[in-house]
């Protein structure tokens, strides 16, 4: 796998580890602030955000497997799956939540897919 592809995969993986932490472990403190959740709504949203965070953790795990799996074909499949899921989730998040998600999630994932398949 090309080094530039590995860099994009690692970047997207780290973004999703951070999102996982914000939505699970850190939601009631840092996460709620980052996502602009009013203090009055933090407790009522905590369980749903934790569930959402778990999905982001699964995406990070797929990307990590794409980086470390010893068989190059399987590693590429994991990376492709992870990047593709992130791109789709980012588009959906941009449409339903905020446009900024398109730049934070979708663009790095699409660039990663492009590098993965073009280099």
Image (spheres, rainbow, N blue to C red):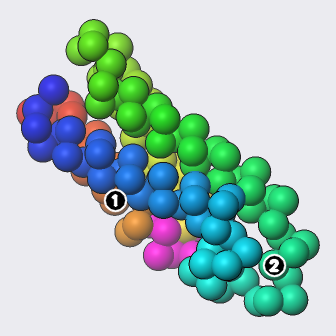
Residue 27 picture quarter: bottom right
Q: Is residue 35 left or right of residue 62?
A: right
Q: Can the viewer see residue 91 in this picture?
A: no
Q: Secondary structure at mark 2?
A: helix
What mark, if any, has residue 42 been given in the picture?
2
Q: Is residue 86 left or right of residue 43?
A: left
Q: Position of residue 99 (x, y in %)?
A: 51, 75
Residue 35 vertical position relative to residue 102 in the rendered view, above or below: below
Crowding near the residue tagged with mark 2, few <14, some 14–19, many ≥20 C-alpha atoms within 10 Å:
some
Looking at marks 1 and 2 on the same chain, the residue that comes earlier in the sequence is marked by 2
In the rendered image, the quadrant that contains the N terminus is top left
Q: Along the line of sight, which residue is nearer the eye, 60 or 73?
A: 60
Q: Position of residue 68 (x, y in %)?
A: 30, 25
In the rendered image, the quadrant that contains the C terminus is top left
Q: Residue at x 73, y 75 (%)?
A: 28
Q: Is residue 16 left or right of residue 113?
A: right
Decide whether residue 100 is among the magenta residues: yes
Residue 43 picture quarter: bottom right
Q: Position of residue 117 (x, y in %)?
A: 20, 31
Q: Magenta segment, which residues? A: 95-102
Q: Along the line of sight, which residue is nearer the eye, 117 or 45?
A: 45
Residue 15 vertical position relative to residue 96 in the rendered view, above or below: above
Quickly name the residue at label 1: 107
SS assignment for the magenta stretch, majority: helix
Q: Position of residue 8 (x, y in %)?
A: 24, 48
Crowding near the residue tagged with mark 1, few <14, some 14–19, many ≥20 C-alpha atoms within 10 Å:
some
Q: Secondary structure at mark 1?
A: helix
Q: Residue at x 65, y 54 (%)?
A: 53
Q: Can the viewer see residue 81 in this picture?
A: yes
């Amino acid at each position: 796998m090309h080094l530039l592809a590995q860099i994009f995969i690692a970047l997207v993986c780290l973004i999703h580890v951070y999102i996982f932490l914000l939505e699970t472990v850190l939601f009631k403190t840092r996460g709620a602030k980052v996502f602009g959740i009013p203090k009055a709504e933090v407790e009522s949203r905590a369980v749903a955000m934790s569930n959402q965070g778990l999905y982001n953790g699964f995406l990070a795990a797929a990307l990590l497997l794409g980086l470390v799996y010893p068989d190059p074909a399987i590693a590429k499949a994991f990376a492709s799956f992870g990047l593709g899921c992130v791109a789709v989730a980012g588009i959906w998040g941009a449409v339903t939540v905020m446009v900024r998600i398109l730049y934070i999630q979708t663009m790095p994932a699409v660039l990663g897919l492009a590098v993965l398949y073009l280099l």
